Image (cartoon, rainbow, N blue to C red):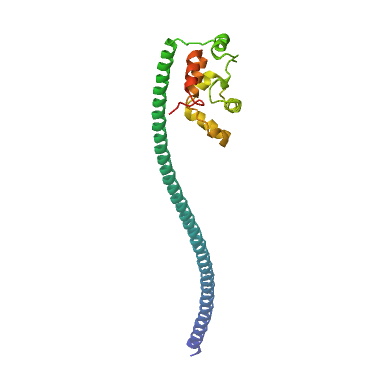
Amino acid sequence: MLCWIIPIIVGLICALLGYLLGRNCVCKKLDDCESIRESMRKDFEKECSDFRKMKTEFEEKLKYKESQVLELQTKVDSCESLRKNMLNDFERERSDFQKVRFDLEEKLKSKENEIFGFQSQIKELEKTPITTFLFNEEAARLVFGKKIKEDDLTIVEGIGPKIQELFKENGISTWKILSETSVERLKEILTIGGDRFIIHNPGTWSRQAELAYQGKWQELKEWQDFLVGGVEPS
């Protein structure tokens, strides 16, 4: 009986030992798997953390780039607005320039016509002989019975020493200049002199000066005899 019990016991012991050994091996493998799983979990969490960090950085960079794009777009819009304004200013200035140019061309044509007219007048004047009157003191003395000085404005009836001085101060110093001066200008000069000069009537003074300049003493003397204080009687 022992012959078959012993093998059974030995078999049970071997089975138990095999179970224990297998159990230990399985537990070890389970521990290894758990360790690997934990390591993989940590790696996964680390990668997830890195991914979230990268995602955050990417989003921040994206926002920054979007802000840059927006800023650039604002600058582009500003440049476009500036370009349009400059173009409008340029068009306006060009239009103004065209107007100024047109006005200048018109004025130039007008001045050219004036110059042409002056040139024609100059040619006509060049054709006209210039008459020069020489002062003959003796002829004047014989008519007036006294010595007459050349360009003495007081020979004109109505002009005294004060008026002569006033006229010379205003550029009228000779018979010729006085003969070429309008009555209106003579009145302006008398007005400058004040109230005591305004009362005088210079209506005949230019003609008297012309006769004196041309040496027409007899005609001047006869006309002055007709005048009353240098004024034609009414």
Q: Hey, which residue is sitting farthest bottom in the picture?
A: 1
Which sits in the foreground, 191 or 111?
191
Which sits in the foreground, 24 or 71?
71
Task: State whether residue 39 is above or below residue 98.
Answer: below
Whole-percent x and y of residue 124?
41, 13
How many labels were placed on the picture? Answer: 0
The residue lying at 41 percent from left, 17 percent from top is 121
- Residue 180 visible at all: no
For residue 150, side relative to residue 112 (left or right): right
Whole-percent x and y of residue 204?
48, 24
Task: State whether residue 156 is above or below residue 31.
Answer: above
- Residue 84 visible at all: yes
For residue 162, side relative to residue 40 (left or right): right
Which sits in the foreground, 227 or 204?
227
Task: State whether residue 195 is above or below residue 44.
Answer: above
Whole-percent x and y of residue 48?
50, 67
The residue lying at 45 percent from left, 9 percent from top is 129
Q: Quadrant of the C terminus?
A: top left
For residue 230, side relative to residue 102 (left or right): right
Whole-percent x and y of residue 140?
55, 12
